[in-house]
Amino acid sequence: MAGGWAKDGAVQEQIDASVEDGVARAKGSIPQGESAEFCELCDEPISQARREAIPGVQMCIECQTEQEKKTQSVSAMNRRASKDSLLR
């Protein structure tokens, strides 16, 4: 139920858009192709088990973890409107 100037289903559309963005972001981050033998950041060897488990992997576990921490803090996006704008 939408109120004010918002059309019916507007909240669900925002939720759906957030989910679609998250899925697209996740699909875009899946490595593809041939795995590297050495990490592209630190040049340490990447274990055979990791290369087999994640085709296309380019970083060792430590560097990948650090990259994900940086990406996670930057990519968070909140599509919800403030309560004030919903009450108008």
Image: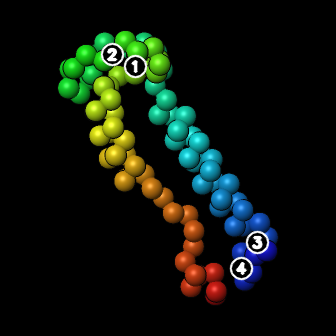
Q: Which residue is mark 1?
A: 50
How many residues crowd around disc 1 within 10 Å: few (fewer than 14), some, or many (20 or more)? some
How many residues crowd around disc 2 within 10 Å: few (fewer than 14), some, or many (20 or more)? some
* SS at badge 2: loop
The disc labelled 2 sits on which kind of residue? Ser
- 84 to the left or right of 6: left
What is the C-alpha distance between the residues marked 1 and 3?
48 Å
How far from the left and from the top, in percent, is residue 27?
55, 34
- 86 to the left or right of 38: right
* SS at badge 1: helix
How far from the left and from the top, in percent, is residue 77?
48, 58
Would you say the residues marked 1 and 2 are in contact, meaning their CB atoms lie under 8 Å apart? yes
Q: Closer to the observer: label 3 or label 2?
A: 2
The disc labelled 1 sits on which kind of residue? Arg
Q: Closer to the observer: label 1 or label 3?
A: 1
| Residue 53 sits above or below residue 20 on the image | above
Q: Which mark is residue 7?
A: 3
Instruction: Quadrant for residue 44, please give it.
Output: top left
Q: Which residue is mark 4?
A: 5
How far from the left and from the top, in percent, is residue 48?
37, 12
